Amino acid sequence: MKYLSDLRSYIAALDELGDIMHISREVDGDLEPGAITRRSCEIHSPAPLFANIRGAQPGFRILGAPAALCSRPEMRYARVALSLGLPADATGPEIVEALSAARHLPLVPPVVVEAATAPCRQNVLQGDDANLDRFPIPFAHERDGGRYANTWGTLIVKTPDGRWVNWSIARVMKVDGKRMVGLMVPSQHIGQIWGEWVALGQPMPYALVQGPAPAISCASGIPIPAEVDEADFVGALMGEPVELVDAVSVDLKVPASAEIVIEGHVSIERDCMEGPYGEYGGYLGTGSSAQPTFHVEVITHRDDPIWPLVVAGRPTDESHTVWAMGIAADMLTHLRDAGLPVKTVWVPEASAVHWLLVVVPSDWRKHLPDMESEAFAQRVGEVLFSTDASLFVPKVFLVDDDIDPTNLEDVVWALSTRIHPTGGRAVFENQRVVRLPQCYTEEEYEARLGPKVVYDTLQPAPEAGRHLHASFEQGYPEALRQHVLRHWPE
Ligand code: MN
């Protein structure tokens, strides 16, 4: 599969699969794109591409659900797979494995191209013209605190000493034409770098990039280690360097083929109210908090630009696909680096990033001869809960590989029948907790500390009487099954 180097070639590839819903009728610029995008996530329809938005300049488009589930059930992860240069029918575990494998590849630094050849420089808006009001930025949900100017764009920031350039996705709310306000979580990489600018007493230069190559969006939305440039990671993942161009007004480089680039500085005080916003846990937001202001100074864009729109909420949206697979890949990498036998790690979409399944090979006892499953569960928790990405994951399940973690019927059956009502778990008290997972008490959110758990669902060893399934597959002689299948349907 070839690496798709811009959003437009990606949309063309989805269109070939029948996974783009072209919406040429006029939609309003307030709630309708959000409502349609949300419904498309819930019924797994093709991704909506809005070509006629009331109040927008002709030619301006919005792409909804850029990396949610594909409308074709036989290739449900095609949007993520194509984004990452994998075959459209790659399975979830194959995508997780590719993301994990890339962590051990040599980094490939980006290359810088001339501004004259960079599509993102086709239009340069400065001064009063650099105004967000020129762009139809819709509301994601009715009760949000404002229009969200970032739901899927890449935020680019750099440490003051230039050693580390971070690409990430975080929600940013539009305040007015010249200001936005973004959620700045201190433990996240952008928050760490912002902290360095705060210590220096200087506003932080940023670029907010809408619609870069889809691999860039995916890499920006998943956890990779601190001090590693996502640009170099994308190069490693794709096997070729990313093309960047100098930003117009700040000392940053931006993806040359991006649809829209917003440049400016972030204040070093939490001087503006952000939120509420409906989030990936599946609930509308209720609170708001003081966060730093993103001042808009320059905007550049391609001709007829395309604005990507993610509408977070009940599964399945990009948090439950890309982010969840990225967390799974990060955890898989950590567990294997710790010498533990793990077949795959998977976050079921329907769990809204609250469940993480660690699938172990049936011969795991050969690799850990002196370990009982209780101790194995304890060890898995020790490794996982020390990582940054585990911040968001409250519940881990250690499961045998007779279960397909991507099949919810398998998962619900196994978790129902293999967990003792009160036992069979390793509890980790006083772990770091943030407000995004839904399952904690107000006291725990205030204290930023709460419990996490690893459920031990592993079955006894085969020689100890491992349970065979009462299934067509395992409950009958092979010859009889073949006979039945030959005559099916009766
Ligand atoms: Mn990072």
Image (cartoon, rainbow, N blue to C red):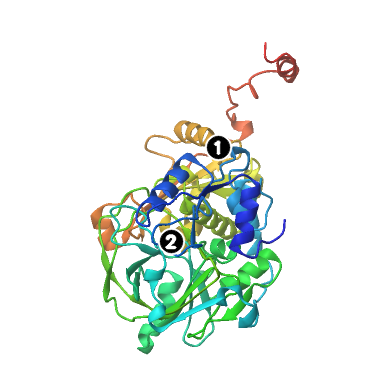
The residue sitting at the top extreme is 490
Task: Give the residue drawn at x 52%, y 54%.
Answer: 66
Task: Give the residue drawn at x 32%, y 60%.
Answer: 449
> What amino acid type should be assigned to the residue bearing mark 1?
Asn
> What amino acid type should be assigned to the residue bearing mark 2?
Thr
Q: Can residue 255 be seen here?
A: yes
Front in this rendered view, residue 87 or 106? 87
Quadrant of the frame with the N terminus: bottom right
Q: Which label's residue is closer to the chain start, 1 or 2?
A: 2
The residue sitting at the front extreme is 58
Label 1 C-beta lies within 8 Å of the nearest ligand 1 atom:
no
Task: Give the residue drawn at x 70%, y 69%.
Answer: 240
Q: Is residue 77 left or right of residue 133?
A: right
Give percent across and percent down for residue 260: 50, 70
Mark 1: secondary structure: loop
Give percent across and percent down for residue 263: 45, 78
Q: Nearer the viewer, mark 1 or mark 2?
A: 2
Give percent across and percent down for residue 51: 50, 55
Q: Can residue 340 be seen here?
A: no
Quadrant of the frame with the C terminus: top right
Front in this rendered view, residue 171 or 481? 171
Residue under numbered circle 2:
151
Q: Residue 407 shows which numbered tag?
A: 1
Q: Is residue 202 above or below residue 26?
A: below
Label 2 C-beta lies within 8 Å of the nearest ligand 1 atom:
no
